[in-house]
Amino acid sequence: MKIIWSEDALLDYHQNIDYLLKDWSESVALQFVEDVEVVIELIQINPELYPLTDYRDIRKALIRKQITLFYKIANESVFLIRFWNNYQDPSRLKL
């Protein structure tokens, strides 16, 4: 499966890393990067591993209790849509 990052997913991903580097530590940021890599590898192996949401065939993978990855399977690709901070107001989530 080919992984395709949306602009929002890339922005969210880098914002999370920047936040972790600024307010936590390099080791915490590196652990987040590793957690994301593991989840993406699992999605490549089995794209249907994580549950569907109630919204347009979009799936969600918990990266950490604070961050959820939303993605969609189409053709032979997986589209990474957003890395969502679970502490934000869910009504603000735009998929």
Image (tube, rainbow, N blue to C red):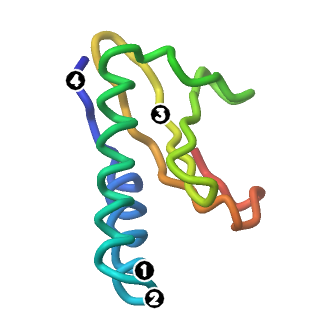
Neighbor class of circle 3 (other Cα within 10 Å; few <14, some 14-19, many 20+) is many
> Where does the image place residue 23, in percent across and percent down from the top left?
45, 88
Above or below, 38 against 50 in this view is: below
Which mark, residue 71?
A: 3
Q: Distance from label 3 to label 1 (Cα)?
A: 22 Å
> Where does the image place residue 14, in percent across and percent down from the top left?
32, 67
The N terminus lies in which quarter of the figure? top left
Q: Nearer the viewer, mark 2 or mark 3?
A: 2
Looking at marks 2 and 3 on the same chain, the residue that comes earlier in the sequence is marked by 2
Type of amino acid under label 2: Asp
Marks 4 and 3: CB-CB under 8 Å?
A: no
Looking at marks 1 and 4 on the same chain, the residue that comes earlier in the sequence is marked by 4
Neighbor class of circle 1 (other Cα within 10 Å; few <14, some 14-19, many 20+) is few
Marks 3 and 1: CB-CB under 8 Å?
A: no
> Where does the image place residue 77, in percent across and percent down from the top left?
30, 20
Residue at mark 2: 23
As drawn, is 57 to the left or to the right of 1?
right
